Image (tube, helix red, strand yellow):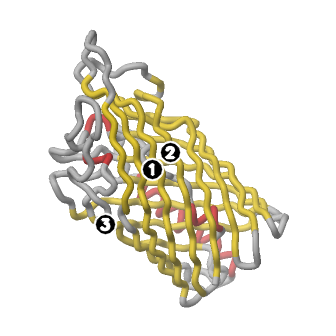
Amino acid sequence: MPVIVRARAASVLFAAVVVVLLSWLPRPAMACASCGCSLSSNAAMGYTSRPGWVLSLQYDYIDQNQLRHGTGSASTPPVGQEFEKQTLNQYITAGLTYAPDSKWNLRLLLPYVIRDHTTYGTYSPPSPLVASDSHSSSIGDAKLIANYQGFLPTRNLGVQFGVKLPTGAYGNAVNFSSGPLAGTPLDASLQPGTGSTDLILGGYYYRAISQNYDAFGELSYQSAVATRDDYRPGDKTTLTAGLRYEAHPKWTPQLQLNIAYKRSDTGLNGDPANTAGMLVYLSPGITAAVAKKSQLYGFLQVPVYWNLDGYQLMPEWTASLGWIYRF
């Protein structure tokens, strides 16, 4: 089959995968991505079919300090509902990738989660607002993801399948340390881990569209298949599209559009009314070569649209910094 025909067939295949996965999304309650980073680190590092090992380290800063409701902002939630003030998330994720050949690679991701959370508790005016605080820093949930990109001789179409493991503390591992709620556990969604084993499916496609520009698309779907403590995190789908400017060998500017959809958390320890929604980020960034085998990258994510169920905290912006070493 000619390469051009194969490329067109690959484009159709990737589009079909996108349509199928997006059809699983909830229709009435579109999504929320404020609890984690939706940046595509694969695109940030640059897709490659080169065999060998890759060591990576990524830092994500996500300060959820803006109360949002629906597509707008909110100053207070309804009376009788929890009034959260801030959740500051910092993730340090170590990654190790091994590619035995140009078709396959296996990637292990292990995050370290640093989280500070402040809430006023139940909103009940005219009672005064008194904050309760918590802090945690520990290992989060690990991911093991396999990629196969042997469909085309150009190796620019790939599929992903993997698993998220419950390696982080979950349930009632973290308690409030001060305020009226001192000694009581945080919500299950604020613990370092979810306690669930999740399946991960996805795909990606990239190609040159001119002499200096590459375009890419990536889709990822994550769903819990085994849960604990009567808590199930909502399924999450992330869609990324973007452009890379490849004119300079030492540095590569990039622009990503990240769309994150999330279903409601369920179970007795979940909060179905305030955990679903959609967030759209515009994410400019750059990758720079700092040595023969090493690269650095940095990205700023700015939310340009959101539609959140209930009342949720989201960030004004997020930042990601990364380091890559290929050997």
Q: Amino acid at mark 2?
A: Ile
Q: Position of residue 249 (x, y in %)?
A: 82, 70
Where residue 96 sits in the image (x, y, percent)?
Answer: 51, 76
Circle nearer the viewer, 2 or 1 = 2
Residue at position x 51%, y 52% in the image: 38
Question: Badge 2 is on which residue?
Answer: 62
Taking the view exactly as shown, the residue that stands out farthest to the top is: 126
From the viewer's perspective, tell me whether residue 270 is left or right of residue 288. Answer: left
Q: Is residue 271 above or below residue 8?
A: above
Residue at position x 15%, y 52% in the image: 230
Q: Which residue is mark 1?
A: 36
Label 2: element kind: strand
Tell me the crowding category of disc 3: few under 14, some 14 to 19, or many 20 or more residues within 10 angstroms, Cα based.
Answer: some
The quarter holding residue 123 reads top left
Res 199 seen here: yes
Q: The C terminus appears in which quarter of the rendering? A: bottom right
The residue singled out by tag 3 in the image is: 167
Query: CB under 8 Å between callouts 2 and 1?
Result: yes
Earlier in the chain: of badge 3 and badge 1, it is 1
SS state under label 1:
loop
Residue type pointed to by label 3: Thr
Give, as a three-letter code, the residue at label 1. Answer: Gly
Residue 310 is at least partly visible in this image: no
